[in-house]
Amino acid sequence: MRQLAQQVVSGLASGGIFASLALAFVLVHRAMGVVNFAQGEIAMFTTFIAWSLLETGMPYAAAFLLAVVAAFAIGVGVERTVIRPVERGPVLATVIVTIGLATVFNGLAGAIWLYMLKAFPSPFPARTVTVDGVAISDQDLGLIGTSLVVMVLMYAFFQHTRIGLVMRAAALDPVTSRLLGVRVGWMLALGWGLAAMVGAVSGMMVAPVVFLEPNFMQTVAIYALAAAVLGGIDSALGAVIGGAVVGVTVNLVGTYLGSIGASLRLVVALAIIICVLVVRPSGLLGRPDAQRV
Amino acid sequence: MLELTEVVAGYGGNTVLHGVSLTVPERTIVCVLGANGAGKTTTLRAISGVVQRSGAIRLDGRSIGRASAEQIARWGVAHVPQGGSVYQKLTVEENLRIGAHLRRDGDVRADRHRVSDYFPWLSRRCDQLAGTLSGGQQRMLAIARGLMMRPRLLMLDEPSLGLAPLVVKEVFDAVRTISADLGMAVLVVEQNARLALRSAVHGYVLEAGAVAVSGRSEVLRADDSVRRSYLGY
């Protein structure tokens, strides 16, 4: 029982990471109906930027903030230059471009920072409190707390700012929005920028747990995608819940299925994606696409 | 304030307007009439910049024939498309706020009160999702949203379509009051010719993508041959 509680707690911690990146998927998908397969690689790239800044002796907080700002610039820049030309084409064209982007960022990171493992510091102290026999580390609490803060900030941005409202409107109905003077193209770019920011946070949370190298976000991206699909790819709250469920499930599978459990973790994530898409494509919280005829 | 000269417009290779010229003077309601497929909606779309078009379109002397839809909206043209197309998943209040999203002037609040005066039910349904309103209310909300832009020119595409006669009257009364109060030019496309000609000062009748007849409303109304051949009543 204690072991179960223990695994649930650390599952929730990784779920927090998945949830942040899942939210990044949701932001782009809500804006343009496309999964950005480069989301994880952009997060990886910005984590490397943070690492380089830290190497210059910059304090963690400053490096963190600068990396987030850089992520925003990269997100907006990529959308305006690479995605914009295919924006009005078929969805598949955009998807293929994002897959290409993933390769580009991966190769670029390898060329700049090489493929050796690098340690990335954690902002959270290495303390652990034990509650009723269950060890809860500050690391775990920090991960959960960070993703909750990210969610609340995003929620406040979209619900309570003018630009957030306009972005939602642009995503809901681009044609009508243009008639109201909304620069829909820039709203998409802004969505990409925000998604890259959220992704950067998740990258900097994952990096201390694993090691930093150009492929370190790839499995995380699959878990995050599973979380986003499970929660309903258009629902921010769904991304959080999906992240928690995937984090805990994957952790329990890894623990209780013995020697094969560890290698089944990714399979479980993929199975979640497939099951949701077959049984309930709108996910837990997504609204089914009802159309009035 | 709005002047179209020999405007040609269409979709893909399919030309719908074959040289339409019309004028909307300052502070005036002008209506465009005609049968289905005559090019009424396309005329509005050509002005607001959502279809391919050529020919001269001038707003307050400025050429807008090559500008993007969002730029034309920013220059003061509010186009309320057929059916209104309100944001179904946003609340009534949010719909209105998007109408005013570009404005930084202090009159936004006053305009918000004004649209509630025109459509009193609006203030009771602020937090309701627009998709749960009746068709007529959605149409009125879309007009109110257009007004929140404080446009120089309001363009309405078939505001009466599918509405009960009483609601239609309510909508047209509001449009007349608004135009008079705010000194706004209004270009309204209608199938209901009798109703439109009662509100408008000028009328244009389109046939197969060109202006067949035009003139002051009372003249068009009085002309029996125009009425029989084009207006169908």
Image (cartoon, rainbow, N blue to C red):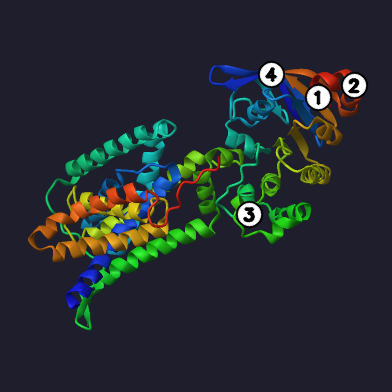
Where is residue B193, by image quadrant? top right
Identify the mark nearer the N-term, 4 or 3: 3
Tag 4's secondary structure?
Answer: loop
- Subunit of label 1: B
Q: Which residue is mark 2?
A: B223
Residue contact at pointers 1 and 2, CB within 8 angstroms: no
User: Which amino acid type is marked by label 1?
Assistant: Leu
In space, the residues marked 4 and 1 are separated at their CA atoms by 16 Å
Is A164 situated above or below A144? above
User: Which amino acid type is marked by label 4?
Assistant: Gly
- Subunit of label 4: B
In space, the residues marked 1 and 3 are separated at their CA atoms by 36 Å
Q: Which residue is mark 1?
A: B231
Q: Which of the two discs, 3 and 2, sits closer to the camera? A: 2
Residue that appears at 69% across and 22% down: B38
Which quarter of the figure is the N terminus of chain A placed in? bottom left
In space, the residues marked 3 and 2 are separated at their CA atoms by 43 Å
Where is residue A241, by image quadrant? bottom left
Which percent across, then down, holds residue B106?
69, 55
Q: Is residue B92 left or right of residue A17?
A: right
User: Which amino acid type is marked by label 3?
Assistant: Val
Q: Which residue is mark 3?
A: B92
Identify the mark nearer the N-term, 4 or 1: 4
Q: Which residue is mark 4?
A: B209
- Marks 3 and 2 belong to one chain: yes
Residue contact at pointers 1 and 3, CB within 8 angstroms: no
**Residue B225 showing in the rendered view:** yes
- Subunit of label 2: B
Which quarter of the figure is the C terminus of chain A placed in? top right
